[in-house]
């Protein structure tokens, strides 16, 4: 009986850890803690479970990590890294950087002290389904982005292509981040592929039920994303010409 219980516990622990990241990022680490993050849609906060589908409109504004009651070290600082590994499948993974935020803590208002290193670019897949993954790392003391990767953090509308092709494993190692302590991911299907795909908007809480994104920067964000994916196509075309 004890052996059966032990095997059941190990099976449950494995299942919990294996579900926090998509398969293509398992090499980075599969922490057992699910990172609780929410998206604000009007006055509603929308949360999501690992692997859940979200509408692109739900994820327009930057995600808000909710680290209180997470079981994490209350005296530590944490770094949030959100990436898209599915735009160009490679091994080891080469990803698009969607945001980097430092100085997060477990206090209820931790985001007030947070520092945005790479401002948020909302998901806007041009084809297929992408797994947008959020990693939480222990933040090293006196942390700074290694100089080799500073260009990946640039956020001006004219240079979004700098977010492409971050060598994720090398970056994590050179930045001294270690293995992630928590993670979560959600899926977004491109509009051209959405027919026949079951899509939800996460788990809402609050007084409003609208799924339309609001804010004063919606049009500018759309312009950034448009330039971003146009630049991606041009960059890939240039790479193909170089290879030929």
Image (cartoon, grey):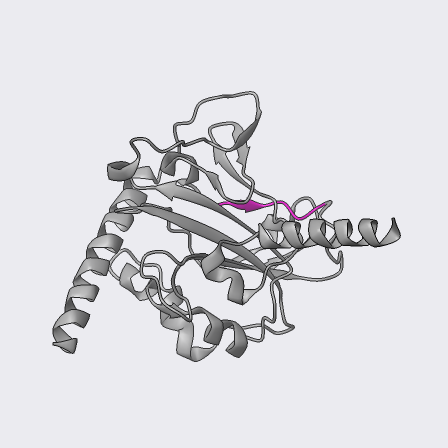
Apparent side of residue 10 relative to residue 217 in the rendered image (left or right): right
Q: Position of residue 240 (x, y in %)?
A: 16, 70
Task: Specify whether residue 108 is painted magenta.
Answer: no
Q: Is residue 62 visible?
A: no
**In the depicted structure, whether residue 217 falls above or below residue 178:** above
Residue 64 among magenta residues: yes
Residue 121 picture location, percent across and down: 37, 51
Whether residue 152 sits left or right of residue 117 in the image: it is: left
Please give the name of the residue rendered at 42% of the width and 51% of the height, measured from the top-left corner.
120
Instruction: Tell me if residue 76 can be seen.
Output: yes
Residue 8 image offset from top left, x and y in percent = 76, 49
- Of residues 78 and 112, which is closer to you in this image? 78
Q: Nearer the viewer, residue 79 or 194?
A: 194
Residue drawn at x 39%, y 63% as measured from the top left: 95
For the magenta stretch, what is the residue range?
63-68
Residue occupying image coordinates x 42% and y 35% = 58
- Identified at 40% across, 65% down, the residue is 153
């Amino acid at each position: 009986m004890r052996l059966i219980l032990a095997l059941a516990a190990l099976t449950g622990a494995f299942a919990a850890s294996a579900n926090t990241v998509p398969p293509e990022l398992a090499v980075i680490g599969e922490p057992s803690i699910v990172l609780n993050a929410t998206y604000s849609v009007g006055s509603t906060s929308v949360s999501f479970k690992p692997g859940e589908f979200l509408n692109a409109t739900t994820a327009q504004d930057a995600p808000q990590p909710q680290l209180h009651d997470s079981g994490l070290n209350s005296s530590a600082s944490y770094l949030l890294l959100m990436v898209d590994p599915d735009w160009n499948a490679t091994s080891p993974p080469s990803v698009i950087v969607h945001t980097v935020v430092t100085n997060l803590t477990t206090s209820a208002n931790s985001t007030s002290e947070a520092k945005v290193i790479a401002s948020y670019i909302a998901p806007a897949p041009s084809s297929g389904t992408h797994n947008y993954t959020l990693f939480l790392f222990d933040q090293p003391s006196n942390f700074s982005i290694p100089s080799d990767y500073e260009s990946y953090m640039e956020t001006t509308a004219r240079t979004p292509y700098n977010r492409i092709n971050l060598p994720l494993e090398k970056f994590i190692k050179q930045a001294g981040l270690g293995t992630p302590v928590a993670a979560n991911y959600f899926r977004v299907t491109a509009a051209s592929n959405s027919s026949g795909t079951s899509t939800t908007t996460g788990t809402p809480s609050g007084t409003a039920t609208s799924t339309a994104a609001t804010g004063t920067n919606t049009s500018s964000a759309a312009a950034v994303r448009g330039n971003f994916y146009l630049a991606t196509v041009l960059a890939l075309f240039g790479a193909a010409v170089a290879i030929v």
